Image: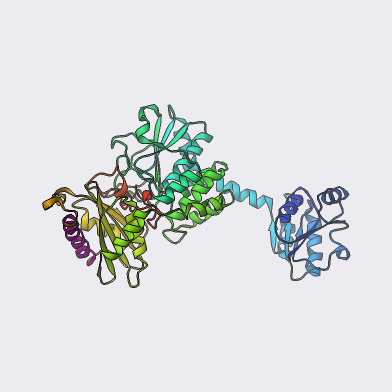
Amino acid sequence: MVRRLVLGCSGVGHTLIEHARQRRGDVYVITDDTGWVTTLRESNVPATEADPADATAYPERADVVVCAADDVDRNLAAARTARRAYPAATLIAYVGGEADAATRESIAATVDRCIDPVSSLTQRVLEAVDADADERIVSLVETVRSLSGPLAVVTHDNPDPDAIAAAIGLTRVADAVGVDADACYGGEISHQENRALVNLLDIRLRHLESVALADYGGVALVDHSRPGINDSLPTDTDVDIVIDHHPPRGPVEARYIDVRPDLGATSTQIAQYLDRLGIEPDERIATALLYGIRIDTRDFTREVAIADIEAAAAILGAANVETLERVETPTVSPETFETLARAIRERELEGSVVASCVGEIADRDTLAQAAERLLDMEGVTVTFVYGFLDDTIYASARARGADVDLGETLRDALGQIGSAGGHADMAGAQIPLGILGAVEGDSTDSLVDVVRESISGRFFETIADAPTPPTADVDLARVPAPADEGGEHGDSDAETAVVGDGSEDGADEDANVDGGNSDVDGENSDADSE
C-alpha cells in the first residue's frame, strides 16, 4: 500500500491531499499550522502538529513525500530533511510564486518533481496564444458570430462516429459563443454501432429532408469539405465553415477552412476547439468525441498523430467508458451474418488477394464488415467485397500488411464506370448497374454472374499493378490547395463515397466510398458515407 506523507499545508496542499485521498494508499500530514491540523482531522485525515522539517515527527515509512507549504524556503528545508529520511522515496515540492531563481534551482536539485505554478501558468498562456491555434480560434469564433441566423452543421451522408461527434461538438462551440446550431445529416444511420452511439447518448440529429436551409444563417461541413460530394446538399450551397481531416481532391471554398490531413480524426480538431475556448464538454459530447477519435484511428493504430492521443486523453475523464462498451457490443443483424457467409462461400483467391461477390444485399453496411472479417483469413492481405442494391453495385475493400494503395487501386479499376476511392488500407466504390442489370430472364443468378465477371475482372487486373501508398503525408496546413478533380475523403474510412446518398456518379470525390463506418474497420458503415 502506497503511503503518502504531506509536509506542510496550504490551499494548494489541501487540494493535493483531497486528490490523494481518492487514490489507493494512506495519506499522513505534518504541519505546524494549528488551523490546518484541525481542518484535516475533521475530514478524517491523519495530521500531526509539528515542524515539517523535524524528522523526529516523521512516520517510519513514506513512499511519496509532498512538501506543500506556501513558503518556498520551508518547503526546501522540509525537502532536504525528507530526502535524508527517505532516500528511496519520490519527493515532490510546491515552489510557489515568489521563489527566486537560486531557490528554485535548489529545490529542483533536491526533489524528483517541482510543482511550479509560474512555469505551468506561463506554459498554459503560451499554448493559449499559440499563433496557429489562436488564429484558428479567433477566425472560427468571428465567423460563427457573424452569421445572420442559426448554424446548420452538416455531416457527410450516412455519418460515421467521427462525423457525428464533430457535428455535435461544433454545435456546442456555436452555443458557447451565443449562436444556435443544429447537427444535420443525410442518408441513413444504419450501422448497428452508429445507431447505438446515437441512441445511448441521446444525440439529437436532424435529417436534411426535415429542414429548410433557408432557415439557417450559415452552413458548416464537418468530416468532409465540399457540398454535394457525399452529402445531400446542393453542390452550389454557400458554405461558411469547413472542418475536416481528409485531404481534399478538389478546391475547398468557405469563409473558414480548417483542413488538417496530419490528424487522424475531425473529432480531434473539435476537442482542440473546446479546449482552447475553455469549454468543458459534457459527458455526451466527450464520449462521442472519444469514440470518434478511436474509430477513425482504429484505436490509435492507423494514421494517428500525437494530437489525437492528447485530445483523447484530455476528454477521457469526462467520457462514459461504460457507454462506449455498450456501443461496441451491439446486436448483429441476420443480414450481416448472411452477407459474411456468402462472402466466404463465394470468395475468389489470387495470391493473397480475395474478391467476393455476395449478390443482392439488403444493407450495404454489411459489405465493409465482411471485407474486414475476411482479412482474418490466413495468408490474405487484401479483401474486396461487393454486392448490388437498388440498381447500384456497392463495394468495400480492406488491406493489412500489403504494399498497395487501395484508394488509388479502386479509382483505377472502377473510377471510369462509377465512384471510387479511399485510404491506402480502406476504400470503397459504387457503380450504377446500368445495362448490367438488363440480363436475360431478369434472373438474379444470371445478374450475379454478369456483375462478378465485370467487377472482379477489373479489380484483379488492376491490383496486379496497383500503386503503392504515398511515402509522405500530405501537408495542407490550414488552407488546402486545390488538388485533382477527384473528390475528397469524406469519411475516415475512405469508404465514404460509396455509401453516401449524396455522392455523385463517377466522382471519386470522396475517397470514402466504402460506406463502411468510418470505423476504420469499416464496420460502421454509415460512417464512411462521406
Between residue 336 and residue 170, name the one nearer to us: 336
Residue at x 78% of width, y 62% of height: 79
Image location (x, y in percent) of residue 321: 55, 53
Image vertical order of residue 49 relative to residue 87, above or below: above
Between residue 462 and residue 468, name the one nearer to us: 462
Residue at x 16% of width, y 48% of height: 434
Type of secondary structure dominating the magenta stretch: helix
Q: Is residue 329 visible?
A: yes
Image location (x, y in percent) of residue 276: 54, 44
> Is 96 situated left or right of 453 in this image?
right
Image location (x, y in percent) of residue 209: 34, 34
Between residue 483 and residue 100, name the one nearer to us: 483
Q: Which residues are magenta?
A: 446-464
Residue at x 51% of width, y 44% of height: 201
Magenta residue check for 398:
no
> Is 460 situated left or right of 475 in this image?
left
Residue 55, picture quadrant: bottom right
Q: Is residue 426 visible?
A: no
Quadrant where the N terminus is found in the figure: bottom right
Q: How is the image coloured?
A: rainbow
Image location (x, y in percent) of residue 345: 28, 65
Magenta residue check for 455:
yes
Count of numbered tags: 0
Image vertical order of residue 359 relative to residue 152, above or below: below
> Is 383 situated left or right of 465 in this image?
right
